[in-house]
Image: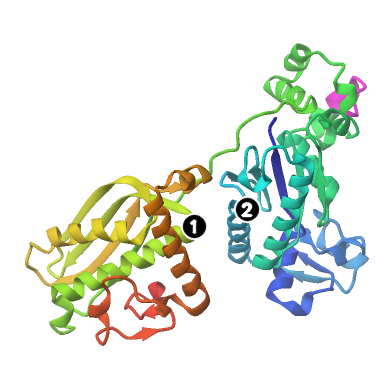
């Protein structure tokens, strides 16, 4: 039996405004221009609803704070939330603005086989709620069930901030209680069509033949039949992975000869690979190919790519490949204006891969994780990576590592 978790952020855009400006905590807040796109629970209890015109919202709640919202900030919170979810299970579908599905079937986080699945799911949801809160300050509602529809309806019941678990085998009794309009995909026109034949509740839909629904509503009818019977079993839509993670820096054209010496260029590339690999691990990705680019001041660009035997997130393996590529590129004797690396062929580092790493690999990865943890606490500059010694005294350093000419790299 499948176990799906649906997660919905409570009052998402309004909560982001409250996190950005803590003076708004506890106050009624609405986000939107023209109509209310999102409102805090303080606004909800004063009669402010989503999709309500703002003038009507202000009439009901004159002390309402209205903000236009910040899409970029909201996206950062959304991605951060998705990252927390991936710590529990690798397969996460990011749906609309503020909800997610997580595939829990067989997830290690659900605990050992034989344990009570509903109790295990509840424990997982509580941990997840705490971790999302700790990482983002956001509150989430969660629903667990054997299908998308059941999980999403369970979340609707759990709002705000709650957890609703529908154990396997209970999905029919659970679905029966809902009006058909609550099923995903049932808009006003379908609702009217169904009402015309006397169907307003999900349980009334059960009397309808699958073929008949298909004939009257087309493909949507079949989808509706599956949802109403707790049999919608589409896999989670695989997420869009980044194409590459790259880091590069440029040199002052007449920045002294030290910057052109091989030990320096090698050390700079080692540092860039270390930065890129740290980002790879932060996003829980693995790379299958390493690319190195060297631009000459004469405008000639050199670029070489090496495929790795297996996808990895280990700095030492990525650096080994990059170093060999650099030596090849430096055979052309011209002054270097820019050097960079890109990690390509990215894939998600799932539980399965994690278990397949060999013992030596495991030890290396634990070391990498320890370095990442120290850097997360004390800044990237707290630990110098392998091979970067030649940069010392040549490139200014800060808490976040070496201060490169490309400002975004020192973030
Ligand atoms: Mg929401």
Q: Which disc, if any, is residue 214?
A: none
Q: Nearer the viewer, residue 111 or 244?
A: 111
Q: Is residue 157 above or below residue 73?
A: above
Q: Which residues are magenta?
A: 192-201
Left or right: where does residue 288 sit relative to residue 43?
left
Pick the front one: 250 or 360 = 360
Q: Position of residue 311 (x, y in %)?
A: 37, 47
Which circle marks residue 85 in the picture?
2
Q: Is residue 202 magenta?
A: no
Residue at 37% over, 63% down: 276
Q: Label 2, label 1: how many angstroms apart (C-alpha)? A: 12 Å
Q: Secondary structure at mark 1?
A: loop
Residue 283: assigned label: 1
Q: Is residue 184 visible?
A: no
| Left or right: residue 119 compared with residue 199 | left
First along the sequence among labels 2 and 1: 2
């Amino acid at each position: 039996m499948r176990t799906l978790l649906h997660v919905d952020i409570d009052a998402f855009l309004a909560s982001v405004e409250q996190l950005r400006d803590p003076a708004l905590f506890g106050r009624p807040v609405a986000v939107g221009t023209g109509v209310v796109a999102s409102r805090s629970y303080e606004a909800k209890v004063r009669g402010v609803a989503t999709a309500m015109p703002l003038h009507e919202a202000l009439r009901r709640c004159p002390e309402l704070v209205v903000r236009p919202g910040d899409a970029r900030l909201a996206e950062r919170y959304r991605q951060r939330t998705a990252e927390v979810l991936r710590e529990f299970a690798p397969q996460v579908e990011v749906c609309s603005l503020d909800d997610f599905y997580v595939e829990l079937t067989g997830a290690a986080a659900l605990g050992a086989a034989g344990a009570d699945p509903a109790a295990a799911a509840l424990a997982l949801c509580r941990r997840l709620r705490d971790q999302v809160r700790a990482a983002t300050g956001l509150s989430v509602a969660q629903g667990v069930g054997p299908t998308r529809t059941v999980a999403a309806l369970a979340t609707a019941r759990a709002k705000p901030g709650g957890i609703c678990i529908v154990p396997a085998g209970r999905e029919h009794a659970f679905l029966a209680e809902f009006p058909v309009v609550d099923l995903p995909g049932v808009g006003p026109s379908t609702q009217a069509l169904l009402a015309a034949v006397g169907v307003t509740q999900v349980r009334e839909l059960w009397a309808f033949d699958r073929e008949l629904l298909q004939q009257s509503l087309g493909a949507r009818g079949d989808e509706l039949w599956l949802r109403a019977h707790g049999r919608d079993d589409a896999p989670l839509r695989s997420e869009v992975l980044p194409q590459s993670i790259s880091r590069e820096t440029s040199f002052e054209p007449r920045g002294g000869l030290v910057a052109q010496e091989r030990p320096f260029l090698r050390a700079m590339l080692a540092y860039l690979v270390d930065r890129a690999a740290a980002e790879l691990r932060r996003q829980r990705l693995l790379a299958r190919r390493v690319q190195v680019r060297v631009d000459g001041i004469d405008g000639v660009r050199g670029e070489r790519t090496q495929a790795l035997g297996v996808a990895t997130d280990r700095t030492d393996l990525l650096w080994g490949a990059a170093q060999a590529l650099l030596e090849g590129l430096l055979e052309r004797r011209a002054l270097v204006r820019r050097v960079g690396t890109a990690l390509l062929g990215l894939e998600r580092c799932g539980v399965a891969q994690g278990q397949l790493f060999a013992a030596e690999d495991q030890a290396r990865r634990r070391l990498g994780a320890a370095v990442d943890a120290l850097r997360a606490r004390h800044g990237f500059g707290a630990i110098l990576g392998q091979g970067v010694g030649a940069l010392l005294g040549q490139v200014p350093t800060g808490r976040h590592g070496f201060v490169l000419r490309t400002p975004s790299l020192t973030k």
